[in-house]
Amino acid sequence: MAFENDDKAKDYWQENLKLVLILLSVWFFCSYVLGILLVEQLNQFKFMGFELGFWIAQQGAMYVFVALIFVYVHKSNALDKKYNVHED
Amino acid sequence: MDLQTLTYIIVGLTFVLYIGIAIWSKAGSTKEFYVAGGGVHPVVNGMATAADWMSAASFISLAGIVSFVGYDGSVYLMGWTGGYVLLALCMAPYLRKFGKFTVPDFIGDRYYSQAARTVAVVCAIFICFTYIAGQMRGVGVVFSRFLEVDVETGVFIGMFVVFFYAVLGGMKGITYTQVAQYCVMIFAFMVPAVFISIMMTGHIFPQLGFGSQLIDAAGNSSGVYLLDKLDGLSTELGFNQYTSGVKSTIDVFAITAALMVGTAGLPHVIVRFFTVPKVKDARSSAGWALVFIAIMYTTIPALAAFSRVNMIETINGPEQTGVAYDTAPEWIKNWQKTGLITWDDKNDDGKMFYANDARNEMKIDRDIMVLATPEIADLPAWVIALVAAGGMAAALSTSAGLLLVISTSVSHDLLKKNLMPNISDKKELMFARLAAAIGIIIAGWFGINPPGFVAAVVALAFGLAACSLFPAIIMGIFSKTMNKEGAIAGMVSGLTFTVAYIAYFKFINPEMNNADHWLFGISPEGIGIIGMLVNFGVAILVCKVTTKIPNDVVLMVEAIRFPKGAGDAQDH
């Protein structure tokens, strides 16, 4: 067992799940809610020369996806260190 | 030097480069053949993954599709990038910790069952063949347009090149070739896009030009935004408004979801994350892959809008009265020869006109949008040659990645793990190469005799990945109780449902393929997401009423959930 005890293993997994769920809700919100469900409403707003909803669906969502993965990389590496289960 | 000679030289040079890399990085063991020895740097792996993922369809067709459907094209843009978030957060690090070679390996071991492994092998092989048929066709199209050889000859040349470096180099050769192919591909895609953006809006970055005002030939702003102009033109000509779609919201939702989940379940993408040295690298590698993909995918909608405006203005003229055919630019006549543009002068005025109503006289195949862009924008010949090389790189890199999955599935999952467990490493490597060779021949045959249903089966490939492999992998990682009965029942029922639905609307009753008959208004392209829910539902129900999973499997699941101890990928 790489963890000091079972409680630590449980805590690590809980924290990991929480991180993943938070990031996935941002993922869902930007693509499905803003880019698809609310696109008509958001299109009433202008963003540069774009209608906002259209921009989110064809540009914005993709930038958010990239950012989400790197946030995850950073946070999960920190989590591994905290529980001392990182690779050498 | 004329265009054709130039194209031969540039395409020829890239081929020499790919083969050279293959010879330099020849695989010596099955581990090198399957996962490149597990020593690929995450940024390099990300670049290779991007090349692996972006196929002839992404390079040649996607901008054309977006250009013709506007907002509705977002399903592909978001669907094919959003899947990487799922891959990075929910799959890549755990599968890397698991430390074996293939997706069926994971499913077979996690569900302690040869039956589960076999179902996964069948899915993997089917998905890959579906895909590869389209790639070989892409090679053929590029050859026939730019090198003016038969589609058949084009496919043969493509087969030979892929054969050489995939069969010889295995994953190791493919990885480094794909890096080269990514560079060729992205350069070839960006150069025309940047040129056309500067020409139309004065912006170097197409992503910014996309939302800017058009400029005239002297460089003065016209005060009209590109997208407003496009919306205006579209409505005037009887098309729907570019920035809003015609698909129902639920269908857009379902297709996007099916493509995202399908992406995360595609075996040739997943297997790339087995090749990095550490779990932490698997995470960042997915991020880098998405960066490299996003460079192209955020440019695609911009290019789509630019070339749409450009094309309409070239054909209809700035006054929207039509342009006389005699004065039409050369590219229209070039593409007419291939049959991808046709002009039928209905009102006998000698002028071309493009619209979505009775006034229309043109038929324009959307596949030409990217390939014709340099000609439409009147760019120098070397740019056109470069685009040909880029299209080829896109098709070859994806074909090679797919072939590798096919050959691994046969030699490793089917022979070594099922039929011939005592086979030596050397023999297994031989069978892997043999399977790749046979795979190429079958793919080539599909390229020369394309089944009329290629477009239909691509939907099937994503649907299958979404409804079978994805749920099985997710439950394998995030549930400690899911047993083999549940997983197999889930995969089989998800598959049956999805295949039946797609087959019904695409092959049995194509005339009923419209929103009135669809389940919840979801088209066959998006049904994989319902198939996924069926899979999860059935698996959980069956799991509740069958036996508990063995203790050693529980320990295995616990072990893949944290990175420590993953340093050495297991030999087999």
Image (spheres, rainbow, N blue to C red):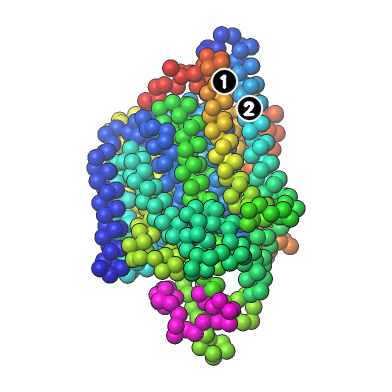
The residue at 60%/15% (across/down) is A9
- Location of residue B266 in the rendering, given as x and y in whole percent from the top left corner: 51, 43
**Spatial separation of the CA atoms under disc 2 and disc 1:** 10 Å
- Where disc 1 sits, the SS reads helix
- The residue nearer to you, when weighing B183 against B460, is B183
Task: Please tell me in which quadrant of the rendered image residue B139 appears.
Answer: bottom left
Q: Could you tell me the amino acid type at mark 1? A: Leu
User: Which residue has dot 1 on it?
Assistant: A79
- Where disc 2 sits, the SS reads helix
Q: Could you classify mark 1 by the number of other residues whose Cα lies within 10 Å: few (under 14), some (14-19), or many (20 or more)? A: some
The residue at 43%/46% (across/down) is B52
- Is B258 left or right of B197, judged from the image as shown? right
Is label 2 on the same chain as label 1? yes
Image: B407 above or below B363: above
- Is B476 left or right of B377, judged from the image as shown? right
**Circles 2, 1 touching at the beta carbon (< 8 Å):** yes
In this view of the protein, can residue B132 be seen by the observer?
no
> The C terminus of chain B appears in which quarter of the rendering?
top left
Numbered range of the magenta stretch: B314-338
